[in-house]
Image: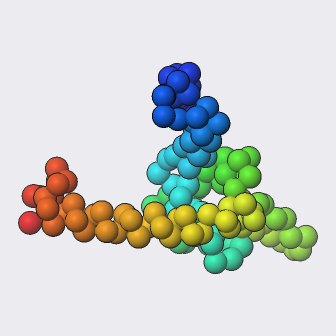
Amino acid sequence: MYKNIKTLIDLKNCKPDHAMALIEILNIFSGKWKMIIICALFQEDIRFTDIRRLIPAITPRMLSKELKDLEMDGIIKRTVIDSTPVLIKYGLTSSAMDLSDVILSLIEWGVKHRKVSIESNDLPCASLSK
């Protein structure tokens, strides 16, 4: 995703390990669906079809891809339950559960920012909503 990592690392006010951490964060969480999927899994481990029900706009193919990516990045765990038929549930890893406060803070900031931006017409599309 980031072709010129050296440029990010060479920033005067950013330590190399901080730059690398930011790059990793952006690589893991970038995209339209990943944060929404993570939020859907905060309450409990659920099946693929349950996630689809919670996020109706995502296609099965995209959901499958995003789940695989998040699993490879250590954000979600995939549990196979030996039953008939076999059940597969997805849940957050303990590392991902540590993100709950961060995600709640981001949501709070987003709500405030959106409200202020719309009220002050800072958004380019704000005039369309009136």
Q: Is residue 50 above or below residue 76?
A: below
Q: Which quadrant is the N terminus positioned in?
A: top right
* Left or right position of 86 against 54: right
- Residue 48 lies in quadrant: bottom right
Query: Which residue is more in the foreground, 18 or 3?
Result: 18
Residue 95 percent across, percent down from the top left: 72, 60
Q: Is residue 81 above or below residue 6?
A: below
Residue 11 percent across, percent down from the top left: 49, 28
* Left or right position of 25 against 87: left
Residue 129 percent across, percent down from the top left: 14, 64
Q: Which quadrant is the C terminus positioned in?
A: bottom left
- Residue 81 lies in quadrant: bottom right
Residue 8 percent across, percent down from the top left: 51, 28
How does the figure colour the protein chain or chains? rainbow
* Left or right position of 5 against 82: left
Query: Which residue is more in the foreground, 18 or 61?
Result: 18
Residue for point 16% across, 50% down: 124
Residue for point 69% across, 56% down: 75
Residue for point 61% across, 32% down: 16
Q: How many numbered discs, if any?
A: 0
Query: Which residue is more in the foreground, 50 or 103?
Result: 103
Residue for point 84% across, 65% down: 80
Let me know if residue 68 appears in the view: no
